[in-house]
Amino acid sequence: AGGASRREGAFGLRATEGSVEGFDRISGDVYCVSDIHTDHTDNFELVKSWPDHPDDVLLVVGDISHKPDVMRRTLTVLKEKYRDVFFVPGNHELWVDREREPESDSIQKFEQVLGLCDELGVRTKPALVGDCWVVPLFSFYDRSLDLTCTKPELLEAHGGHDLSGNADGEGASEMLNEWAQ
């Protein structure tokens, strides 16, 4: 309960227990992880082996899996380990498998991921954790940001995917993501 008030002429917010002008205010230590790729069995087993942090917060900033069932399973395990879990979809969550999802695109996949998070109680909206704002930002891959250098150590980043391009000159992310027209 409670709320927040803005002092006249001030830009700062004064937080009180419960919320800050409509945003949740929660407590706990904040942990952060990304690129856990739990569609690989070894990675999922590692996540399951993490110690419980029932009073703490975990930020998962992308790349659990492109498979909805793997995402559900992983987020469920993380919710059992942490009091609060925040999630921001990465590029892998937005990959569309044309054989399994012939009518889907990455925008629809994005909406499905957010729906799954809502269903599981995984946070995707800003909240104040102690004195730290957690503000999940959603964005999409822009081809103008493609890696164009030829340094092999950079081109093999992200799990060994060849980011330099395929025979058609398109990068891996462009090939695997289907964007709404």
Image (cartoon, rainbow, N blue to C red):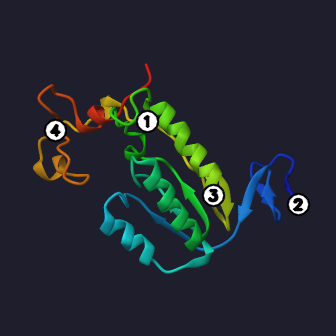
Q: Which residue occupies 16% across, 40% down?
A: 149
Who is closer to the viewer here, 140 or 131?
Answer: 140
Pointer 3 and pointer 2: residues touching (CB < 8 Å)?
no
Q: CA distance from mark 2 to mark 1?
A: 36 Å
The answer to whether residue 145 is left or right of residue 77 is: left
Tell me the residue that label 4 is attached to. Answer: 164
Q: CA distance from mark 4 to mark 1?
A: 19 Å
Q: Is residue 143 above or below residue 112?
A: above
Residue 2: give its label.
2
Q: Secondary structure at mark 4?
A: loop
Q: Which residue occupies 20% across, 41% down?
A: 163
Q: Earlier in the sequence, mark 3 or mark 2?
A: 2
Q: CA distance from mark 3 to mark 2?
A: 18 Å
* Displayed quadrant of residue 123: bottom right
User: Residue 103 location in percent, x, y?
Assistant: 43, 26
Who is closer to the viewer here, 3 or 89?
Answer: 89
Q: Amino acid at mark 3?
A: Trp
Q: Which residue occupies 75% across, 48% down?
A: 11
Q: Earlier in the sequence, mark 3 or mark 4?
A: 3
Q: Is residue 125 above or below residue 48?
A: above
Q: Amino acid at mark 4?
A: Ser
Q: Earlier in the sequence, mark 2 or mark 4?
A: 2
**Residue 124 visible in the shown view:** no
Q: Amino acid at mark 1?
A: Phe
User: Residue 14 location in percent, x, y?
Assistant: 80, 59
The answer to whether residue 145 is left or right of residue 101 is: left
Residue 140: give its label.
1
Q: Secondary structure at mark 3?
A: strand
Q: Earlier in the sequence, mark 2 or mark 1?
A: 2
Q: Secondary structure at mark 2?
A: loop
Most distant residue in the top direction: 181
